[in-house]
Amino acid sequence: MVRIISALSVASLPVVLAASISCSASSPYSVGNPDSLYSEFVLAWDLTNANHASFVTNPGTDWDEVFSRWRVQALTLSDHDELLAVITGMLAELGNGQVLLRTSQGLTRPNDPGFFENFDPVVWQSYTDQWGFQYWQEFFDFGWAYVTPDSTMGYLFLPDMGDRYSWADFLFMTVSVRECSGVILDLRASGGTGDFISAYNTVGRFVSDGNRLAFYRQFRTGPGRYDMGEPSPVTVTKNGSWQFDVPIVVLVGRGTAGAAELLTLMLETQDNVILMGDSTFGAPDVSCAYLLNDVSYNDETWLYLPGFVVYDTEMNVQNGFGIEPDISVPVSPGDFAAGVDPVLETAVEYLTLKTRGQ
């Protein structure tokens, strides 16, 4: 199933190709003739073959056979839409949701299981319009901060940790809710891209107890698809001049992916943090971006590949598996049709009791 992720969860601004420590080193591939649809197809294959870090999590896929089969179709392409369909079909066979394609139409996930997401933007907007949060609000390019009139409860909403996200601006945004007795961090719609550095620096505001093991990273180290180094531990540390020590409820679901999923893994190391909602998507770290065509050719197409494999603290692979919440909150399409957000209501009820000492 191919889906274009909603504009709420991804930026519509141009992608900036930047180096990241999350990315493995790549060769300077040529896009060839910008008018050649086939060269763009081959480039997508070459980049994936040389840089994709998660072949090791799905060793049953015969990647050479996949290429040979889709190559037949690529030789007879007539337009860019057909090209994208062929590239998408080929990449979908990798068997995980970490690989992404971005065009002017938005961000697509070639391998998308079609999870039901526990977030609805229309219902969410109705809550922010009607609840006490509406009395105080601060807006940034990548998120929102709200606080109730009595300053007892704060709410931080991050719909995107991708290219326009700034962890430094986020730390500044959290000052808005610093004096609250409890804070909700909503990551249910943060399913785009992002990188390790953004997640690592963001979590520092929530780390009251540092140097706790969050997960392990395993990088690809050679030209072979299964050339992998030894897993290296990631421990959390404080960032900024102050940290939250109040109850924190982190809202997650199938729409939580990429850097937001890495952030979730690090957040759950803290004793004052509770994960609430549904399992996350299972695609941590989609952070390496590659341009597939010349910038002057028709429509820019960017390919995002995972930079490393993620393991939890017990060395269980996280790529392809979602992070389970501490408190599961069932949500159905009927809830949204009725204008109800059970996850947000449960979080507010939980924090209300928590901040009252109950």
Image (spheres, helix red, strand yellow):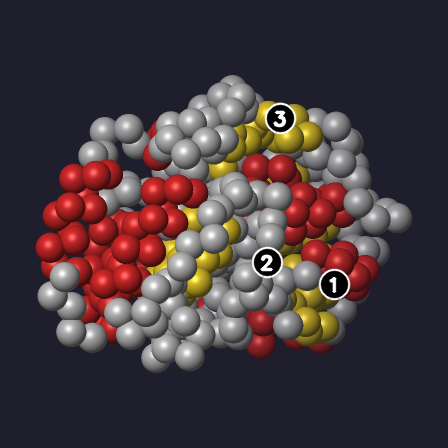
- Reading the chain from its start, which is encountered first: label 2 or label 1? 2
Q: Secondary structure at mark 3?
A: strand
Badge 1 density bin: few <14, some 14–19, many ≥20, Cα 10 Å: some
Number of labels in the image equals: 3
Residue closer to the observer: 260 or 349: 260
**Real-space Cα distance between discs 3 and 2?**
24 Å
Q: Secondary structure at mark 1?
A: helix
Q: Is residue 224 above or below residue 111?
A: above
**Real-space Cα distance between discs 3 and 1?**
27 Å
Marks 3 and 2 close (CB-CB < 8 Å): no
Q: Is residue 262 above or below residue 332?
A: above
Q: Residue at x 70, y 34 (%)?
A: 236
Which of the 4 image quadrants contains residue 348? bottom right
Q: Residue at x 48, y 70 (%)?
A: 8
Residue position marked by numbered label 2 in the rendering:
18
Residue position marked by numbered label 1 in the rendering:
169
